[in-house]
Amino acid sequence: MFADPTGAHAATFAAVFATLYVAHQVADHWVQTQRQADCKGQPGWAGRIACAAHVATYTLTALITLATMVLATGLRLDPWGVGVGLTVSAVSHYVADRRTPLQRIAAALGSARFYALGAPRPGRDDNPSLGTGAYALDQSWHIGWLFVAALFCAA
Protein backbone atom coordinates (compact mmCIF):
# COMPACT_ATOMS: atom_id res chain seq x y z
CA MET A 1 0.00 0.00 0.00
CA PHE A 2 2.76 2.46 0.90
CA ALA A 3 5.56 1.13 -1.33
CA ASP A 4 6.32 4.05 -3.63
CA PRO A 5 9.82 4.28 -5.09
CA THR A 6 9.02 7.64 -6.74
CA GLY A 7 8.27 9.36 -3.44
CA ALA A 8 4.96 10.66 -4.75
CA HIS A 9 3.04 9.21 -1.81
CA ALA A 10 5.42 10.82 0.66
CA ALA A 11 5.03 14.17 -1.08
CA THR A 12 1.25 13.81 -1.03
CA PHE A 13 1.34 12.97 2.67
CA ALA A 14 3.58 15.98 3.38
CA ALA A 15 1.29 18.34 1.46
CA VAL A 16 -1.81 16.97 3.19
CA PHE A 17 -0.26 17.10 6.66
CA ALA A 18 0.93 20.68 6.16
CA THR A 19 -2.52 21.64 4.90
CA LEU A 20 -4.29 20.00 7.85
CA TYR A 21 -1.86 21.67 10.25
CA VAL A 22 -2.61 25.09 8.77
CA ALA A 23 -6.35 24.37 8.89
CA HIS A 24 -6.00 23.27 12.51
CA GLN A 25 -4.27 26.48 13.56
CA VAL A 26 -6.81 28.68 11.78
CA ALA A 27 -9.88 26.73 12.91
CA ASP A 28 -8.79 26.25 16.52
CA HIS A 29 -7.68 29.85 17.07
CA TRP A 30 -9.53 32.06 14.57
CA VAL A 31 -12.70 30.27 13.47
CA GLN A 32 -13.73 28.93 16.88
CA THR A 33 -16.10 31.36 18.57
CA GLN A 34 -15.58 32.60 22.11
CA ARG A 35 -18.79 30.84 23.18
CA GLN A 36 -17.57 27.54 21.75
CA ALA A 37 -14.22 27.94 23.51
CA ASP A 38 -15.90 28.83 26.81
CA CYS A 39 -18.59 26.13 26.74
CA LYS A 40 -17.21 23.09 24.84
CA GLY A 41 -15.79 21.47 27.97
CA GLN A 42 -18.86 22.00 30.15
CA PRO A 43 -20.85 18.98 31.28
CA GLY A 44 -24.22 18.19 29.74
CA TRP A 45 -25.83 19.09 26.47
CA ALA A 46 -24.70 22.71 26.43
CA GLY A 47 -21.08 21.55 26.39
CA ARG A 48 -21.71 18.78 23.87
CA ILE A 49 -23.49 21.15 21.48
CA ALA A 50 -20.80 23.84 21.78
CA CYS A 51 -18.09 21.24 21.15
CA ALA A 52 -19.98 19.74 18.20
CA ALA A 53 -20.41 23.22 16.68
CA HIS A 54 -16.68 23.87 17.07
CA VAL A 55 -15.79 20.51 15.54
CA ALA A 56 -18.17 21.16 12.63
CA THR A 57 -16.54 24.50 11.79
CA TYR A 58 -13.10 22.97 12.42
CA THR A 59 -13.81 20.15 9.96
CA LEU A 60 -15.31 22.52 7.39
CA THR A 61 -12.18 24.67 7.64
CA ALA A 62 -10.04 21.58 7.04
CA LEU A 63 -12.16 20.57 4.04
CA ILE A 64 -12.00 24.05 2.50
CA THR A 65 -8.24 24.24 3.10
CA LEU A 66 -7.68 20.79 1.55
CA ALA A 67 -9.86 21.70 -1.44
CA THR A 68 -7.90 24.93 -1.91
CA MET A 69 -4.61 23.02 -1.79
CA VAL A 70 -5.90 20.47 -4.33
CA LEU A 71 -7.12 23.19 -6.68
CA ALA A 72 -3.86 25.13 -6.39
CA THR A 73 -1.55 22.15 -6.85
CA GLY A 74 -3.52 19.72 -8.99
CA LEU A 75 -2.85 17.01 -6.41
CA ARG A 76 -5.33 14.15 -6.54
CA LEU A 77 -6.79 12.78 -3.34
CA ASP A 78 -9.18 9.87 -2.95
CA PRO A 79 -12.49 11.29 -1.64
CA TRP A 80 -13.02 8.23 0.57
CA GLY A 81 -9.59 8.62 2.11
CA VAL A 82 -10.26 12.29 2.73
CA GLY A 83 -13.61 11.41 4.29
CA VAL A 84 -12.02 8.86 6.62
CA GLY A 85 -9.16 11.22 7.46
CA LEU A 86 -11.46 14.12 8.28
CA THR A 87 -13.66 11.82 10.36
CA VAL A 88 -10.63 10.67 12.37
CA SER A 89 -9.66 14.30 12.85
CA ALA A 90 -13.18 15.35 13.88
CA VAL A 91 -13.76 12.51 16.35
CA SER A 92 -10.34 12.87 17.99
CA HIS A 93 -10.81 16.64 18.17
CA TYR A 94 -14.20 16.29 19.86
CA VAL A 95 -12.79 13.82 22.42
CA ALA A 96 -9.96 16.17 23.39
CA ASP A 97 -12.07 19.31 23.45
CA ARG A 98 -14.61 17.85 25.86
CA ARG A 99 -11.70 18.26 28.34
CA THR A 100 -12.47 15.41 30.77
CA PRO A 101 -11.32 12.58 28.46
CA LEU A 102 -7.96 14.25 27.82
CA GLN A 103 -7.55 15.05 31.51
CA ARG A 104 -8.24 11.37 32.35
CA ILE A 105 -5.80 10.15 29.69
CA ALA A 106 -3.13 12.50 31.07
CA ALA A 107 -3.76 11.22 34.60
CA ALA A 108 -3.63 7.58 33.46
CA LEU A 109 -0.28 8.23 31.79
CA GLY A 110 1.15 9.93 34.89
CA SER A 111 0.88 13.45 33.46
CA ALA A 112 -1.79 14.90 35.76
CA ARG A 113 0.64 17.45 37.24
CA PHE A 114 1.73 18.56 33.78
CA TYR A 115 -1.92 18.84 32.69
CA ALA A 116 -2.58 21.16 35.66
CA LEU A 117 0.57 23.25 35.07
CA GLY A 118 -0.29 26.92 34.78
CA ALA A 119 -4.01 26.46 35.46
CA PRO A 120 -5.72 29.11 37.57
CA ARG A 121 -6.09 28.17 41.21
CA PRO A 122 -9.58 26.98 42.20
CA GLY A 123 -11.90 29.93 42.63
CA ARG A 124 -9.46 32.38 41.02
CA ASP A 125 -8.74 33.63 37.53
CA ASP A 126 -5.07 34.31 38.23
CA ASN A 127 -3.45 32.77 35.17
CA PRO A 128 -5.67 33.13 32.10
CA SER A 129 -3.16 32.14 29.43
CA LEU A 130 -2.42 29.67 26.68
CA GLY A 131 0.75 28.66 28.51
CA THR A 132 -0.77 25.74 30.39
CA GLY A 133 -0.02 22.05 30.48
CA ALA A 134 -3.61 21.35 29.44
CA TYR A 135 -3.18 23.51 26.32
CA ALA A 136 0.14 21.88 25.43
CA LEU A 137 -1.33 18.38 25.80
CA ASP A 138 -4.45 19.41 23.86
CA GLN A 139 -2.43 20.76 20.95
CA SER A 140 -0.01 17.82 20.85
CA TRP A 141 -3.02 15.43 20.89
CA HIS A 142 -4.53 17.27 17.93
CA ILE A 143 -1.27 17.29 15.95
CA GLY A 144 -0.74 13.59 16.59
CA TRP A 145 -4.18 12.81 15.24
CA LEU A 146 -3.62 15.13 12.27
CA PHE A 147 -0.70 12.85 11.38
CA VAL A 148 -3.07 9.85 11.36
CA ALA A 149 -5.70 11.81 9.43
CA ALA A 150 -3.13 12.83 6.83
CA LEU A 151 -2.12 9.20 6.36
CA PHE A 152 -5.74 8.35 5.49
CA CYS A 153 -6.23 11.42 3.31
CA ALA A 154 -3.06 10.71 1.36
CA ALA A 155 -3.67 6.96 0.95
Image: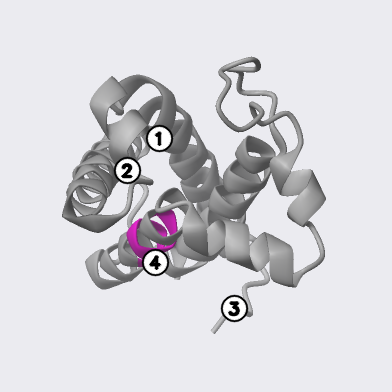
101, 74: nearer the viewer:
101
Q: Is residue 137 left or right of residue 91?
A: right
Residue corresponding to mark 3: 2
**Quick one: SS at disc 2?**
loop
Q: Earlier in the sequence, mark 2 or mark 3?
A: 3
What is the spatial separation of the Cα atoms under label 4 and label 3, in whole angstroms? 19 Å
Residue corresponding to mark 4: 88
Find out whether residue 27 is within the magenta segment: no
| Residue farthest to the bottom, as pictured | 1
Q: Residue type at mark 3: give it.
A: Phe
* Residue 130 position in % (x across, y down): 61, 23
What is the spatial separation of the Cα atoms under label 3 and label 1, in whole angstroms? 25 Å
Q: Residue type at mark 1: give it.
A: Ala
**Across the whole image, how many numbered discs are drawn on residues?**
4
Residue corresponding to mark 2: 40
Q: Earlier in the sequence, mark 4 or mark 1?
A: 1
Q: Which residues are magenta?
A: 88-93
What is the spatial separation of the Cα atoms under label 4 and label 1, in whole angstroms? 15 Å
Which label lies toward us, 2 or 1? Answer: 2
Q: Is residue 92 above or below residue 53?
A: below
Q: Quadrant of the N terminus?
A: bottom right
Which label lies toward us, 4 or 3? Answer: 4
- The tag on residue 23 is 1
Q: Is residue 22 left or right of residue 6?
A: left
Q: Earlier in the sequence, mark 3 or mark 1?
A: 3
* Residue 102 position in % (x across, y down): 56, 59
Residue at 71% across, 47% down? 115
* Residue 62 position in % (x across, y down): 32, 42
Q: Is residue 61 above or below residue 153?
A: above
